[in-house]
Image (cartoon, helix red, strand yellow):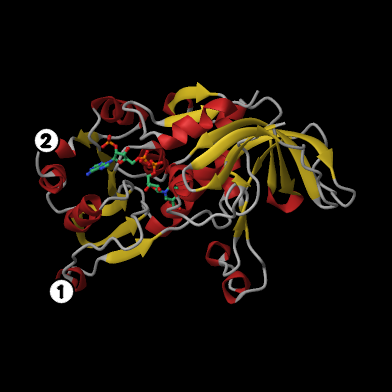
Amino acid sequence: MKAARLHRPGEMSVEDVAVPIPGPRDLLVRVEAAGICGSDRHMFRGEYPTALPVTLGHEFCGIVEGVGEDVSQVRVGDRITADPNIACGHCDACRAGRVNLCANLQAIGVTRDGGFAEYVVVPEGQAIVLPAGLDPLLGAFSEPLACCLHGLDVARIKPGDSVAVLGGGVIGLIMVQLARLAGAGSVVLSTRQAPRRELALSLGATHAVDPSAGDAAAAIRAIAPEGVDVALECAGVPETFSQALAVVRRGGAVVLFGVMAKGTTVAVEPFDLLVREVRLESAWLNPHTHARAAAMIAAGQLKLAPLISRIVGTADIPAELMAEPRFGDIKVMVRPG
Ligand code: NAP
């Protein structure tokens, strides 16, 4: 089969490899669709640790074509999504139920071969069966949606709350929708690309601001003079973290979701956070949220098709990861073969 294999930072090739053999508790899954994520770019550049060599691809959906002898729930022919993060179940974090903080976390498409290939092996316990008729391109959103759902859980948005989403990539555009589904009365998105702002308004945002047009925090404060109840940082840049702290109201919450490069620092004024009792939270990965994400996609609760900007083949993956994201792209999907 063809697989996009990362050998060293910056060195990836699409090559012929043997179809993997599932272990007794594993599924052999024919990949139908896999999303390219910003983390894949970080891994490609060596900015995020991976096993090497490895087939990347942690957001995927496919059909089960083989099962190990001890597989009991999933059947050949099922369409599944996989929670890529495999917790050890034994460390302190796992025993406390905080599986995303597992000290020995393994991940499909990071530390073991993933979905940028024709086939991938998935432990049965990581698989969630999707409806047979679901478009696999939508099923491949399960992983990013699952991460967003954890962000939403952490944010504790209440009906009627005001929310600011800073950064309008795929994550921000999903967060806009989740905030409205959680009952937010107003959602303002800040992002530089005008088509994304228009899209956000069509997806449920009540306001959209352009941070390149001036002071984004002031623009959000003009919409919500007392500040917002919840600010979700979804860009992964220092400015948006500072803006989130500036736009949150007294007693409100800031959720750090975007990934800033290791070593990045941001100035904060502890006195200001203290006397305004700002709840400062972070949300990492998808603890116990993958099945909920799959259920929401199966129920058609989110508009995900408008977030797909391009579909490419396996052979295109190295060039996609080498290049900066193209203007206008939101989610680039891979369809193997
Ligand atoms: P993305 O496609 O890079 O989207 C982020 C967007 O933020 C950019 O495309 C950009 O859009 C916007 N942006 C950049 N600078 C900005 C600024 N100064 N003000 C306002 N917007 C700005 O990434 P994504 O896939 O949506 O993911 C968002 C972040 O979440 C990334 O850092 C990603 O690594 C992280 N992430 C975290 C988790 C987790 O578990 N915590 C899971 C998945 C992803 P414009 O060009 O329109 O401004």
Q: Nearer the viewer, residue 223 or 114?
A: 114
Please report the residue visible at 50 percent of the width from the left and 55 percent of the height from the top: 285
Ligand 1 falls in quadrant: top left
Q: Which mark is residue 271?
A: 1
Can you say whether 309 is above or below 285 in the image?
above
Queried on whether the Cβ of the residue with tag 2 lies below 8 angstroms from ligand 1, the answer reads no
Task: Pick whichever, 191 or 8, lies toward us.
Answer: 8
Q: Which mark is residue 283?
A: none
Q: Residue 235 in the image: state x and y as whole percent.
A: 31, 46
User: Which amino acid, mark 1?
Assistant: Phe
Q: How many marks?
A: 2
Q: Residues within 10 Å of mark 2 (few under 14, many from 20)?
A: few
Task: Say whether residue 299 is visible.
Answer: no
The residue lying at 20 percent from left, 73 percent from top is: 274
Position of residue 172 relative to residue 287, above or below, is: above
Q: Residue at x 15, y 44 (%)?
A: 216
Q: Give me the disc on residue 213.
A: 2
The quarter of the displayed image where residue 204 is located: top left
